[in-house]
Image (cartoon, rainbow, N blue to C red):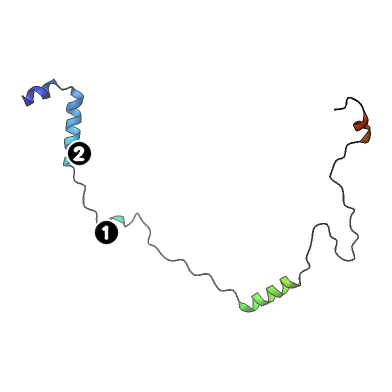
Amino acid sequence: MDQVTRASRSPGDLVQDLYLKELRAYKPPPIKPSDSEGHVQKFSAPKPPQSPDESDIAKDLKVYEDQQVELEGQTATGEAGAPEESWFEEEDEDEESAPGSH
């Protein structure tokens, strides 16, 4: 009776059965530790950064502390400052009082 049911199946099922049979029978080769050689680079830790020279730090800090603070809108001593411009646009009074302007 088993042959009768197999004979009545469509040809696509026969191909699927063969595929599944081969798939179940497949045994992958065992993985060896040396398999990754040539595909993966060896890890080497990066060199640690060089420590900055302590005397340079003290000198750089002193230079930083002695710097003049520059603020926007302020002028340095002895310089003539440019007049500050107003970027706000005001409507003309004539336009406000004109009827039908809104």
Specify which label sits upstream in the sequence, 2 or 1: 2
Location of the N terminus by quadrant is top left
Which residue is at the front of the view, 16 or 44? 16
Q: Residue furthest bottom?
A: 55
Separation of residues labelled 2 and 1 (CA atoms): 26 Å
- Judged from the image, the secondary structure of the residue bearing numbered disc 2 is helix
Location of the C terminus by quadrant is top right
Residue kind at label 1, given as amino acid type: Pro
Indicate left or right for 29 with 98 as reference.
left
> Please, is residue 74 above or below residue 9 in the view?
below
Query: Residue, x 21% and y 49% (percent of image)?
Result: 29
Say the numbered circle drawn on residue 23: 2
Query: Residue, x 53% and y 69% (percent of image)?
Result: 49
Residue 40 point in image, percent of width and height = 36, 56
Say the numbered circle drawn on residue 33: 1
Residue 96 point in image, percent of width and height = 90, 32
